[in-house]
């Protein structure tokens, strides 16, 4: 037994100090070759192409023996997974981009999570790319747009790659298009956040652009009186009638008062009846008439309209950080014997920062 144990110990020690096996040597040599194939220039090239991190680029280049195309494809696959995780986050910032082709004008709203990214050059380039591509298509369907090809990839693949690079949820939300044979279209975009398309019969593209600026500023509800739904007119008439019902005036006078106020309502809310803001000396309808044109319609988009944004309680977050605790979903009301803090005495509306009403949104 002692002899057997001694022989086993001798064999173990011999293996421990023996030269590396052939397979292990080959493995180490292969790793050395992979590292040698991955040069800083290749890493830089892959980073510029994908926007991925340096260590991620180095790792995947080693995995594919310095093949930049294969490495970029692998990073894109990983980027797709990251993009899917970010897709549930609210994207209410962004940009309105415009494209035009073959007499057809298009607006595309592309959303992101923060206004910082909305000003990013890569994001802006993607939005413009989407609008140009949308103008070349026949419909206004987002799904068809995302499947369309651009520079050898689908627009969806380009979007997913941008999500991986920037790290925010980015979505092409909607498309608006105007223009057909026999009409003239023009567009105006205000600070990348409000976009307007105007379509007229006759006239020029410059005239459309001038009227689009008016629409961006005044935000009319309808283009002409004919565009106002009958139910909207009846509802407004009922409201106006109720307002003057107790005036004590004869019925015929009341009817005239209601019709007068109804006409005022239509004039204020229909584009062609509004005073043209650029000169303020005539209506938009008169401007069209002077240029031998007729209103067909308009479309107005504003970034994030209709998207419910998350509202953070900044005071509660600061208090929680100072106290080392967690932020509660809804801060508890002060107890009866405790006095509310001065900050709590103000309503949320009172502490908001307001801007001058330059535009009607």
Image (cartoon, rainbow, N blue to C red):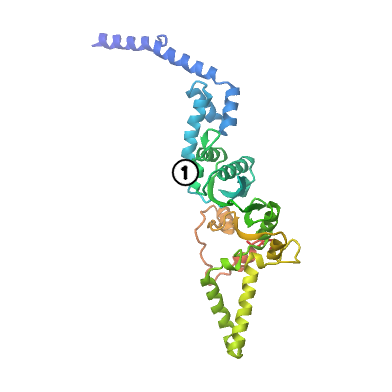
Left or right for 22, reference 250: left
Figure check: 205 above or below 338: above
Q: What residue do we see at 52% from left, 71% from top?
A: 230
Q: Quadrant of the C terminus?
A: bottom right
Q: Name the residue nearer the viewer: 224 or 23.
A: 224
Left or right for 174, reference 25: right
Q: Residue furthest left?
A: 1
Q: Position of residue 4 (x, y in %)?
A: 26, 10
Figure check: 56 above or below 166: above
Figure check: 64 above or below 169: above
Q: Quadrant of residue 38?
A: top right
The answer, for residue 133, to whether it is visible in the render is: yes
Q: What residue do we see at 56% from left, 69% from top?
A: 338
Q: Residues within 10 Å of mark 1 (few under 14, many from 20)?
A: few
The answer, for residue 21, to whether it is visible in the render is: no
Q: Position of residue 144 (x, y in %)?
A: 48, 44
Q: Quadrant of the N terminus?
A: top left
Q: Name the residue nearer the viewer: 209 or 193.
A: 209
Q: What residue do we see at 47% from left, 43% from top?
A: 85
Dot 1 falls on a residue whose secondary structure is helix
Q: How many numbered discs?
A: 1
Figure check: 260 above or below 353: below
Which residue bears the numbered disc 1?
A: 85
Q: Quadrant of residue 256?
A: bottom right
Q: Position of residue 346 (x, y in %)?
A: 62, 67
């Amino acid at each position: 037994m002692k002899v057997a144990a001694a022989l086993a110990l001798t064999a173990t020690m011999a293996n421990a100090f023996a030269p590396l096996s052939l397979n292990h040597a080959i493995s180490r040599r292969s790793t050395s070759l992979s590292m040698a194939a991955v040069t800083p220039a290749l890493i830089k090239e892959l980073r510029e192409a994908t926007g991925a991190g340096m260590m991620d680029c180095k790792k995947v280049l080693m995995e594919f023996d310095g093949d930049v195309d294969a490495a970029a494809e692998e990073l894109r696959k990983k980027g797709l997974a990251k993009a899917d995780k970010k897709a549930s986050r609210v994207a209410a910032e962004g940009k309105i981009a415009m494209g035009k082709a073959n007499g057809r004008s298009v607006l595309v709203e592309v959303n992101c999570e923060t206004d910082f990214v909305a000003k990013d050059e890569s994001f802006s380039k993607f939005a413009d790319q989407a609008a140009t591509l949308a103008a070349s298509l026949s419909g206004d369907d987002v799904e068809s747009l995302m499947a369309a090809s651009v520079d050898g990839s689908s627009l969806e693949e380009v979007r997913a790659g941008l999500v991986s690079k920037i790290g925010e949820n980015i979505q092409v939300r909607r498309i608006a298009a105007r223009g057909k044979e026999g009409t003239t279209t023009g567009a105006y975009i205000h600070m990348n956040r409000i976009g307007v398309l105007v379509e007229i019969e006759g006239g020029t593209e410059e005239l459309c652009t001038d009227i689009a600026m008016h629409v961006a500023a005044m935000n009319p509800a309808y283009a002409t009186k004919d565009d106002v739904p009958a139910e909207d007119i009846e509802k407004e008439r009922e409201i106006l009638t109720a307002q003057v019902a107790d005036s004590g005036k004869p019925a015929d006078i009341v009817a005239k008062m209601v019709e007068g106020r109804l006409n005022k309502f239509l004039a204020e809310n229909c584009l062609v009846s509004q005073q043209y803001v650029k000169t303020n000396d005539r209506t938009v309808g008169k401007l069209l008439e002077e240029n031998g044109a007729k209103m067909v319609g308009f479309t107005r988009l504003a970034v994030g309209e209709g998207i419910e944004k998350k509202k953070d309680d900044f005071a509660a977050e600061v208090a929680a950080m100072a106290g080392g605790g967690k932020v509660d979903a809804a801060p508890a009301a002060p107890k009866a014997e405790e006095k509310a803090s001065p900050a709590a005495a103000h309503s949320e509306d009172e502490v908001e920062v307001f801007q001058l009403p330059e535009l009607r949104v």
